[in-house]
Image (cartoon, helix red, strand yellow):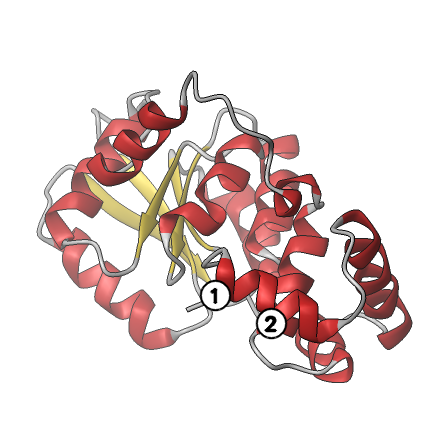
Amino acid sequence: MTDKAIIRVFIADDHAIVREGLKQILAESPDIIVAGEAEDGIDAIKHVRKARCHVMLLDISLPDRSGIDVLKLVKKEHPELAVLMLSMHREDQYAIRSLKAGAAGYLTKQSAPRELVTAIRQVAAGQKYVSAALAQELASAVGENHDTPLHDTLSDREYQTLTMIASGKTVGAIAKELSLSVKTISEYRSRLLVKMKLKNSAELTHYAIKNQLIE
């Protein structure tokens, strides 16, 4: 890092209240400053280029595109930037996908402010950060002899489509929310049904509930 060890942070979250809350938390740490913010993926990609940041706080659910998609694009342009994913989802749903895509860490928005500051300092120092609970889960999985769950074979977009359908959203509503065509979402749905050996959305929803992929 530069700037006399000051950690420059960029916040990408579509909720103004969340951004303000994060800024208030970080304002209490003299070694951290917020150098920029964005409310959607396109703005995040555009403005982070100019912000000269060390850490990016990236919401996994942005209105115009998946946070994981934004993560991949940002890491492609700025491989040195530490990206800390923030999410309302339980850690086991998206944490592994985020880390595989290049994230330096993953936190739920329910985490304590102190944990957020610790995570920022840790990823800024070039380390990875996951919560103690997730670390235990990952450690427990090492060496286990079990088949890979079918949902782990899905692409990030297919997985996102799965969780949204299982949450009761129609193909049209998903297409609108993700700024994609109905045809594209229908193709994702068809592919994931084939990969998971399921017949319809009802079976998909049952699978998601059984495997705790949705709340």
Q: Is residue 138 visible?
A: yes
Three-letter residue code for mark 2 = Ala
Three-letter residue code for mark 1 = Ile
Query: In percent of the image, x 65 and y 54: which residue is there?
Result: 159
Please report contact status of discs 2 and 1: CB closer than 8 Å, yes or no. Answer: yes
Foreground residue among 56 and 170? 170
Does label 2 or label 1 sit earlier along the sequence? 2
Residue 214's label in the rendered image is 1
Residue 166's label in the rendered image is 2
Q: Residues within 10 Å of mark 1 (few under 14, many from 20)?
A: some
191, above or below 52, in the image: below
Asked which quadrant contains residue 148, the reply is: top right
Q: Residues within 10 Å of mark 2 (few under 14, many from 20)?
A: many
Asked which quadrant contains residue 30, the reply is: top left
Distance between mark 2 and mark 1 Cα atoms: 7 Å
- Which residue ends up furthest to the top in the rendered image? 143
The secondary element bearing badge 1 is classed as: loop
Quarter of the image with the N terminus is top left
